[in-house]
Image: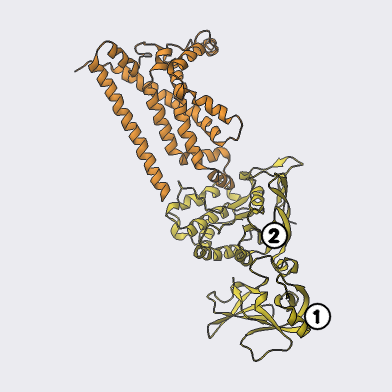
Chain colours: A yellow, B orange
Amino acid sequence: MNQILAEFAIDRGDFQLEVSLKLPAVGISALYGASGSGKTTCLRAIAGLERLPGNVCVAGQVWQDDDAGIFIPPHQRAIGYVFQEASLFPHLNVAANMNFGRSRVAASRQRIGESKVVELLGLEKLLKRSPAALSGGERQRVAIARALLTSPDLLLMDEPLSALDKARKLEILPYLERMHDELALPIIYVSHAADEVTRLADHLVLLEHGHVKAAGPLQDMLMNHQLAGLFNDGASCVIEGVIDQHLEQFASELKFGHFRLRLSQQTNPLGSNVRCRIFASDVSLCLTQPHDTSISNIFPAEVVRIDPATRPGEKLVTLRLDQTHFLLAQISSHSVERLQIRPSHHVWAQVKSVAVL
Amino acid sequence: MVELDLSVVWLTLKLASVVTLLLLLVATPLAWWLSQTHSKLKPFVGALFAIPLVLPPTVLGFYLLLLLGPNGPIGQLSDTLGLGTLPFSFAGIAIACAVHSLPFVVQPLQNAFEAIGKRPLEVAATLRASPWDTFWHVVVPLARPGFFTAAVMGFCHSIGEFGVVLMIGGNIPGETRVMSVEIYNHVEAMEYAQAHWLAGGMMLFSFVALLAIYIINHRVAQRGKR
């Protein structure tokens, strides 16, 4: 398996880190945790910018193996690294910044072409400018392009959006999604922002005080009731689908599995991939199919399990739509008893609102 | 028109140029090491190379004379290498001037290197640049104002060198007699007109050189603000 393996253990007294990461070689893996949880340290150690006792193996290549005395210096590792601040070289213009890494990679190893990257990140008009003449969002896009042009085996991103305001963040996120969809490049993405993680991540590693608290595919992590408080904005699940049709009355439809989810009107073209987040608190349950309701997204579902929610007096109900699609509903314990909701019962789930990511 | 010995001016400029070149070669690696190291030796090395800032030139000259003289370790080395003895020669005062001016070159360089910070070096490493490559293509361009300041400071300080030159070089025309020594000679001989030409020329030169540094630093600071 071409997995990404990284193990580090260090005890500096006030800072302890003991992690063992096994990440898939495709898609975006998010290292998520509060500041001080060690996620940036992990990323820097994988890049070799920081030397912690441990082992790193990426795409079958050993980058660090303490027992064998191997430590490949960062400039000999096939990484791309995007820092929190763009950190462009002020003495070089945009094109020269982008070329800095590429010119140091053998032509035979260059897989990602310049024109592709320029197009992917929308940089056509910026190439001749100096970094000082760019906005924060533009700078970060150039920094991402510069890292991509080294054709890395692994792209490491350290909170690349946290230094940007909301508008700049929203400007960059679609580019990251395109990278995810169009480049076969594993990405490790460090973040403490739930919205970025739910939108981008395929795989999630939850770090707490230098330890891995939980790790797995994003959906599994979200559906894990023990991690109900994973993101502090409430229990939720993520639905990924394709924009299927644009309806009249300012609405669009998302197709996922055999189901359709009615959304507010989307600007994305038909066929584009969209992720939505459905909060458990926005899902209510009925025993019979409701007809006289204002809610338009209603799905038949089977109760899988019922767990205590983070708030007392409430239950978190896991619902199965089909083999691969699940929902979470947060309802009061009182309602669970009143409606006699039990595992394997069939119910109707009403989705009151959907957050398009 | 007063009679001016232009060979004195020429010798002084030659000395300052040689010393500046020598200093940049020696001070660059030293300043880089001081800016990057976490070694416990750093304050000791830093203090050692800053001594010429505070020491009277006569003290420095005295010890250099002992070191470079026929019985000193460096003098014996240069003798065995067939280079002859260094005191009272151009090479001797060049070495002495370089030692005396070293902190004036090391400090602007060290400040410039430290101002760059760790981040550009890390970025360069993640873009496949080796440390040597990074030094030439990231550090040197970013520290350019520091190199300019260091070179001007080294040059000007060497042009005005007096005490150390007198101790090591004496007063040999065409070999060690530089402008500051010549001014002293003129004043001793009550030749104030000649002294004025040389002293005034040095005043003007120093002002222009420092003005250039201040203008460049001001421009860099303005650019940093944008």
Q: Is residue A2 visible?
A: no
> Is residue B117 placed above or below B14 in the rendered structure?
below
Please provide percent x and percent y for residue A154. 64, 54
What residue is shown with label 2?
Answer: A206
Q: Residue A9: x, y in percent?
A: 73, 47
Can residue B189 be seen here? The reply is yes
* Secondary structure at numbered mark 1: loop
Q: Residue at x 47, y 26 (%)?
A: B102
Asked whether the residues under marks 2 and 1 belong to the same chain, the reply is yes
Task: Please say if B44 is above or below A214.
Answer: above
Residue type (three-letter) at the residue carrying disc 2: Leu
Q: Which residue was labeled with disc 1?
A: A344
Vertically, is A188 above or below B21?
A: below
Looking at the image, the residue that sits furthest to the left is: B1
Residue at position x 72%, y 44% in the image = A53
Question: Residue B46, image x and y in percent?
Answer: 53, 29
Q: Is residue A235 left or right of residue B205?
A: right
Classed neighbour count for the residue bearing mark 2: other residues with Cα under 10 Å, few (<14), some (14–19), many (≥20): many
